[in-house]
Image (spheres, coloured by chain):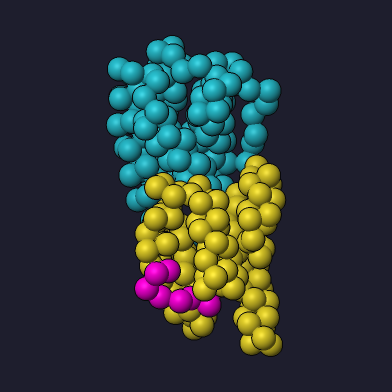
Amino acid sequence: MHVLIMEDDVFFQKFYSSKLTESGFQVTIASDGQEGLEKLAKVRPDLILLDIIMPKKDGFDVLKAITADKQLRSIPVLVFSTLGQEQDVQKAKALGAYDFVNKSLLDYNVLLTKVNKVVSMIQKS
Amino acid sequence: MDDLTNYRQTYIKTAKEYADLMATQLSVLEIDPTNESAIEEVYRISHSLKSSSVAMRYSNTASLCGIFEDIFKKIKDGTLESSEELIQIVKDSADRLKKSISHIELDNTEIDLSSELRKLRMIGKLEKIIEY
């Protein structure tokens, strides 16, 4: 399974990419929304982990672009959130995000549970 | 929760980079407190450093970055006016932030940032300080 992480913070890029790689996932990283969309034009991940606040294009811009694209809109998106971002999470879900993960908890098991839920959904379909 | 010690070096490296970037943008704002690009950058840096500080359980540092984030969000939204006075207080607090990161690097402890939080709350006209 291929995961595309769109996250500008190097700390979280390293944490989540190393953990997902250890779990057997193929990981691609984009450091901002613009780069993320450029990578989506070339690769088709099975899942996107998307930060909301990023330079160039933010998570909302990316979600709008994904849902507007017939080929991309079927890719599930998990949104990274932090404390105090509840409204942003609701906005992201309204724009098509499948679920969210509180990245500040730094609890990989929570992320893995949600990722595996998406994996099961993909495999069933 | 995951063992945090493995990520401490990554945190310190990125935190120092962010603190330096913030200082650069605040120097721009010292000259022009309304520079939109610099305001956006400080907002984004504050958000990122807050998130990683929360993750690493450095609560004082996270709270300070959180208040920077709140202030610059208000400036972006137009509900708070940026000024030379505000930027100077933020700049002084950002210097203390650097000191806290140095302490974390040295012996994994933070410095007391409560005075900075109080000053920023006042100048930022914030109802409360969120402690992480």
Q: Is residue B106 left or right of residue A15?
A: left
Quadrant housing the C terminus of chain A:
bottom right
Look at 40% across and 36% down and name the residue there: B41
Q: Give the colour of chain A.
A: yellow
Look at 37% across and 73% down and name the residue there: A42
**Residue stretch rendered in magenta on the structure:** A40-47
- Number of numbered labels in the structure image: 0
Q: Is residue A52 above or below residue A14?
A: above
- Residue at the bottom extreme of this rendering: A124
Q: Quadrant of residue B118?
A: top right
Camera-side residue of B117 and A28? A28
Q: Quadrant of residue A102?
A: bottom right
Q: Is residue A1 left or right of residue A31?
A: right
Q: Is residue A104 above or below residue A23?
A: above
Task: Indicate the chain coloured cyan by its letter.
Answer: B
Look at 52% across and 66% down and name the residue there: A69
Q: Can residue A42 be found in the magenta stretch?
A: yes
Q: Is residue A16 left or right of residue A92?
A: left
The answer to whether residue B2 shows anywhere in this view is no
The answer to whether residue B59 shows anywhere in this view is yes
Residue B100 percent coordinates (x, y): 43, 36
Q: Can residue B127 be found in the magenta stretch?
A: no
Residue B9 percent coordinates (x, y): 38, 56
Residue B5 percent coordinates (x, y): 48, 60
Camera-side residue of B44 and B51? B44
Q: Is residue B113 left or right of residue B22?
A: right
Q: Is residue A85 above or below residue B95?
A: below
Look at 64% across and 36% down and name the residue there: B131
- Magenta highlight: main SS: loop
Residue B122 percent coordinates (x, y): 59, 16
